[in-house]
Amino acid sequence: MGHVDAGKSTMGGNILYLTGMVDKRTLEKYEREAKDAGRESWYLSWALDTNTEERAKGKTVETGRAYFETDKRRYTILDAPGHKNFVPSMIQGASQADIGVLVISARKGEFETGYERGGQTREHTMLAKTSGINKMVVAINKMDDPTVNWDKARYDEIVGKLTPFMKQTGFNPKTDIHFMPLSGFSGANIKDRDTKVCPWYDGPSLLEFLDDYKTTDRKLNAPLMIPISEKYKDMGTIVVGKIEAGHLKKGQQVVIMPNKHNTEVTAIYDETENEIEQAMCGDNIRMRLKGIEEDEIMPGFVLCSKKNPVKTTTQFEAQLAILDHKNIICAGYTAVLHIHAAAEEVQISALLHLIDKKTGKKTRKPPQFVKQGQKAIARIETSGPICIETFEKLPQLGRFTLRDEGKTVAIGKVTKVLDPSE
């Protein structure tokens, strides 16, 4: 993720090439086509930006997916769009990831544009944190640009500006962030370390760092939960999602919430379209379902075990932190809630307590309003039933963002799921 034109798709394309997932022949074809279109330097990004609109404008619109492997691991790349009009798609991508790679352009003027107010570097960092990405690689890209030329002073300047900001967002600079200089276009420091062009950096290359990264604990034996991120028809109904808890076998009987639709998983496919017998927590998979039509499913529905289905409700209590809102927010305020893969219109029906930032204590009296920088407990009503869990029980289904007028207004975590009939 990162600001528009930081070089996310190009870097992704080069990773696919360096790990042998895209062969030289295909890349040469892209290079020819890109040259004919007068877009020479874009050819690597075409490995990820596959639709014509994305290629014509050189901008990613949907979160692109790709798959690669190293000697140690299998990976799914989620290439998020940088443009602020496509932030909801970026949130959906971030909610499926284990580790974030924030791409920063070192080119003169480009880092500044992305980092200043209104640039996407700040918003993406914050959204990644709320979507559950706790570890971040900051890839300082375009180090080979003529305005930079692998200059250590420029690299240090960017690291110096980003570190306090990321600390403020909630990342611990010592344990949660790793900065590295690289070039997505030339491939320097992506797979192999390049000491010729960059003698002053002695850390690992990007893929070396990812291979040694310890993944989070997987909830293998918890009840099955798979938020559905996309669905389509292909000789039956196919859904795509990441297993957030539990494990899944071919032929398993499951239920889709909130519609309580019983269905059977007749096939499971991995990232390379191979059919597999079972999948574990943490896997990104496609599933073929029996006994349900594609139009009966929406992104944000959750596929779960029949014994322990996910909670569904139209009312819940949550802790909100107001990030960016000019006016005060009172009961009756409406916004769009983004939680795992779902987006739903909501209304704050009541403000219950203010939270003191220093002590963490709640006020007894409900506040009349909240404003930017404050934290509160609020009751939220949704326009339709949604699938959620409390943050304590399953963080992936218990954290959310509220957006309004193209901005992220607040971030929150679900503290209590209320019974819709209450």
Image (cartoon, rainbow, N blue to C red):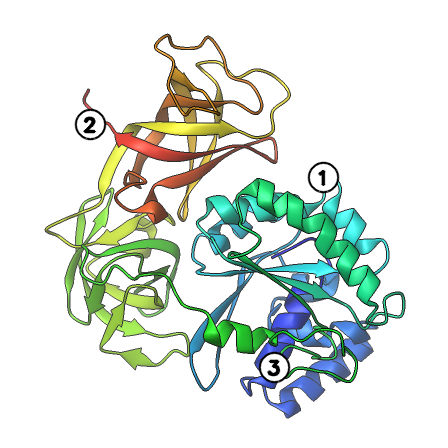
Residue drawn at x 22%, y 45% as measured from the top left: 310
Q: Nearer the viewer, mark 1 or mark 2?
A: 1
Q: SS at mark 2?
A: loop
Amino acid type, callout 1: Gly
- 3D distance between C-alphas at marks 2 and 3: 51 Å
Label 2 with label 3: CB-CB less than 8 Å:
no
Q: Do the residues labelled 3 and 1 touch (CB within 8 Å)?
A: no
Residue 398 appears in the figure? yes
User: Which secondary structure, mark 1?
Assistant: loop
Q: Which amino acid, mark 2?
A: Asp
Q: Residues within 10 Å of mark 2 (few under 14, many from 20)?
A: few
For disc 3, the marked residue is 191
Give the labeled residue for mark 1: 118
Q: Which of 321 and 401 is in front in this view?
A: 321
Q: What residue lies at 52% left-to-right and 22% top-to-bottom?
A: 374
Judged by depth in the image, the label closer to the viewer, 2 or 3, is 3
| Residue 28 image offset from top left, x and y in percent | 71, 88
Few, some or many C-alpha atoms within 10 Å of disc 1 (few <14, some 14-19, many ≥20)? few
Name the side, left or right, on which 38 lies relative to 182.
right
Q: Residue furthest left?
A: 307
Q: Quadrant of the N terminus?
A: bottom right
